[in-house]
Image (cartoon, helix red, strand yellow):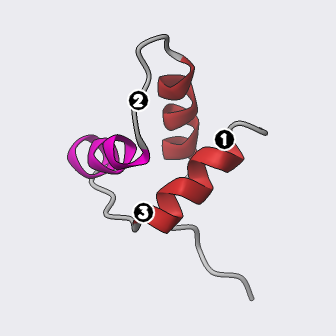
Amino acid sequence: MSRKPLISQPIREHLARELAEPEGFESYTEVKMWLETTQGVSASYKVVHHTVRLSRWE
């Protein structure tokens, strides 16, 4: 049985759109803050890093 992802698919899709914007994000820490303030998701730096790296391949 697999665990439910901390960052849901709709939020990952929204993040991918944000990352595609020219202004984007300057750091993983900035992504982490965006997730907390706009999406209500508190994730570790490791989870954010993994999610951003995966979003580039989806």
Q: Earlier in the sequence, mark 1 or mark 3?
A: 3
Percent of width and height locating residue 26: 39, 31
Q: Is residue 25 above or below residue 28?
A: above
Q: Position of residue 7 (x, y in %)?
A: 50, 58
- Compared with 4, 55 (above or below) is above
Label 2, residues with CA under 10 Å away: few <14, some 14-19, many ≥20: some
Task: Residue at 33%, 58% (x, y): give it.
Answer: 41
Amino acid residing under circle 2:
Phe
Query: Residue shown at 21%/45% (left/top)?
Result: 37
**Hey, which residue is sitting farthest right in the picture?**
57
Q: Quadrant of residue 25?
A: top left
Quarter-of-image position of residue 57: top right
Of labels 1 and 2, earlier in sequence is 2
Do residues under tags 1 and 3 come within 8 Å of each other at their CB atoms? no
Q: Which residues are magenta?
A: 28-39
Between label 1 and label 2, give the one nearer the viewer: 2
26 and 22: which is toward the camera: 26
> What is the quadrant of the N terminus in the image?
bottom right
Residue 5: name its quadrant. bottom right
Callout 3 crowding tier (Cα within 10 Å): few <14, some 14–19, many ≥20: few
Could you tell which of marks 3 and 2 lies nearer the N-terminus?
2
Residue with the mark numbered 3: 45
For mark 1, what is the residue? Answer: 55
* Residue lying at the far left of the rendered structure: 37
Three-letter code, disc 3: Tyr
Marks 1/3: CA distance? 15 Å
Q: Is 36 within the magenta? A: yes
| The stretch drawn in magenta includes residue 38 | yes
What kind of element bears circle 2? loop
For residue 13, above or below residue 1: above
Report which residue position mark 2 lands on.
Answer: 25
Q: What secondary structure is found at the residue carrying circle 3?
A: helix
